[in-house]
């Protein structure tokens, strides 16, 4: 479980010549809980603060004030060494998969094991192959990223992210650039491994199919505030206008909602 308490994040607003114009508050008193064993989604419009929130969670940015607690451990109060050890409990899936083009699929999945695991070469290779089998890519282990599809690359990224058996999995727009069918495969894969490994999975997404399909705990960020939190099943009946305007932005979705509500 990851708990966020009264989180604020501000940035200095500088002019072109470096003069301080003021301070821009991007996150404003965010408090929430990301639960174990469910798919936690962060949603919101571009510029709402959801990416800044995720960066604060993983330590790429430091909050102006507030707390981020990993199973009760205050990430902000940890020493540099403690944070390094903490990050070994985290898996990351980046928007563009971020695979190494010069490495085979198997070598990509082995990379975090080579860096951090105290295993023999044979044990690291076996673990990497287990992860590839989990995402149904055992036959692609000797291919290079340029030889496989975008959807397969995302599955390799998932295999690499779970190689060290993380307690916490962070996914930044995992369906970006994928067709709807492949996006569904990625969603179901993330959902199933989250339940299987009881991870705290946090997904930053714009994909409404993901929201409605695997949104077990959804946090809606609007203008830096936590505007709403709930499950996908709660969205249809929500009276929060900002949420419904965001979710049902298209006329077709509005008509579908009206039909379901009538």
Image: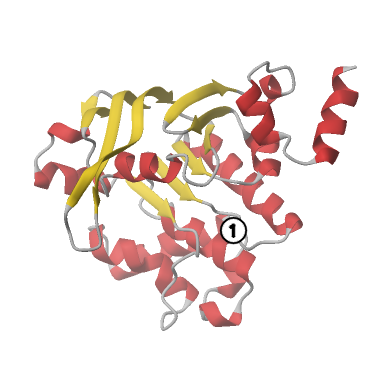
Relative to residue 145, is residue 175 depicted above or below?
above
Task: Tell whether 165 sits left or right of 241.
Answer: left
Q: Nearer the viewer, residue 180 or 142?
A: 180
Does 226 appear above or below 135?
above
- In this view, the residue in front, 60 or 34, is 60
Q: Residues within 10 Å of mark 1 (few under 14, many from 20)?
A: some
**Residue pictured at 56% horizontal, 68% vertical:** 153
Residue 53, position in %: x, y? 37, 39
x and y percent of residue 83 in the render?
17, 44
Q: Report the residue at 33% width, 26% height from top.
A: 4
**Screen quadrant of the C terminus:** top right
Q: Quadrant of the N terminus?
A: top left
Could you say where residue 148 lies in the image, as x and y percent from the top left?
61, 76
**Image point (22%, 28%), residue name:** 73
Q: Position of residue 179 (x, y in %)?
A: 72, 61
- Classify residue 71 as left or right of residue 82: right
Which residue sits at x=18%, y=34%?
Answer: 76
Badge count = 1
Residue with the mark numbered 1: 176
Question: In terms of secondary structure, where does tag 1 sit?
Answer: loop
Taking the image as drawn, is residue 188 in sight? yes
Location of residue 37 with respect to 114 vertically, above or below:
above
Q: Is residue 181 left or right of residue 48?
A: right
**Quarter location, residue 254:** top right
Snapshot colouring: secondary structure
| Residue 70 visible | no
């Amino acid at each position: 479980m990851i708990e966020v308490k009264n989180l604020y994040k501000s940035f200095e607003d500088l002019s072109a010549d470096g003069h301080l114009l003021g301070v821009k508050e991007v996150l404003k008193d965010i408090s929430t809980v990301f639960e174990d064993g469910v798919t936690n989604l962060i949603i919101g419009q571009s510029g709402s603060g959801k990416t800044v929130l995720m960066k604060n969670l993983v330590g790429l940015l430091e909050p102006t004030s507030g707390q981020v607690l990993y199973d009760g451990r205050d990430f902000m109060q940890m020493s540099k060494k403690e944070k390094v050890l903490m990050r070994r409990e985290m898996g990351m899936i980046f928007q563009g998969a971020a695979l190494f083009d010069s490495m085979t699929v198997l070598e990509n999945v082995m990379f975090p094991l080579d860096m951090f695991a105290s295993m023999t070469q044979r044990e690291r290779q076996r673990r990497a192959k287990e992860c590839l089998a989990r995402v149904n890519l055992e036959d692609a282990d000797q291919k290079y990223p340029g030889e496989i599809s975008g959807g397969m690359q995302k599955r390799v990224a998932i295999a690499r992210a779970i190689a060290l058996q993380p307690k916490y999995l962070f996914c930044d727009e995992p369906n970006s650039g994928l067709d709807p069918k492949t996006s569904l495969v990625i969603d179901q894969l993330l959902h199933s491994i989250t339940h299987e490994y009881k991870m705290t999975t946090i997904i930053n997404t714009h994909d409404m199919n993901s929201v409605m399909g695997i949104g077990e705990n959804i946090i809606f960020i609007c203008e830096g505030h936590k505007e709403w939190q709930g499950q996908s099943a709660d969205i249809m009946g929500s009276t929060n206008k900002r949420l419904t305007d965001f979710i049902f932005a298209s006329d077709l979705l509005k008509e579908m909602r009206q039909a379901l509500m009538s």
